[in-house]
Image (cartoon, rainbow, N blue to C red):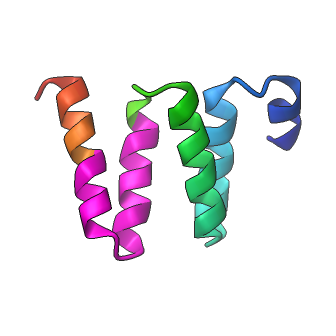
Amino acid sequence: MDLAIEVDSKEPNAYYSRAIVKNELYTWKSALKDYDKAIEIAPKFVSALINRGGLKDQNGDYQGAITEYETVLKLEKL
């Protein structure tokens, strides 16, 4: 995934995929940075927003998680 980012640093899926791996490896701060970058590139990237919300929830940032989920609800118009 690092190579994919080197080839195209504007591809949000590369950051998203790397964030998932980092999350599984419990490197949460680094995973959060990759989710942030994916969402910076693609602000309506719902899967990244949901996962970032879950990561925030896992780490005790409950208000941050709520904010992520509210953003998803607005984007999905639910």
Magenta segment: does it hold 45?
Answer: no
User: From the image, which quarter does the N terminus lie in?
Assistant: top right
Say whether residue 26 is left or right of residue 63. right
Q: Residue at x 57, y 27 (%)?
A: 41
Magenta-tinted stretch: 47-68
Residue 9 figure quarter: top right
The picture quadrant where one finds residue 40 is top right
Figure check: 5 above or below 76: below
Residue under the image location 54 percent in, 45 percent down: 36
Q: Main secondary structure of the magenta part?
A: helix
Residue shown at the point (82%, 31%) measured from the top left:
4
Residue at 31% across, 59% down: 64
Q: Quadrant of the C terminus?
A: top left
Q: How many numbered tags mark residues here?
A: 0
Residue in front for this viewpoint, 20 or 39: 39
Q: Does 27 sit above or below residue 31?
A: below
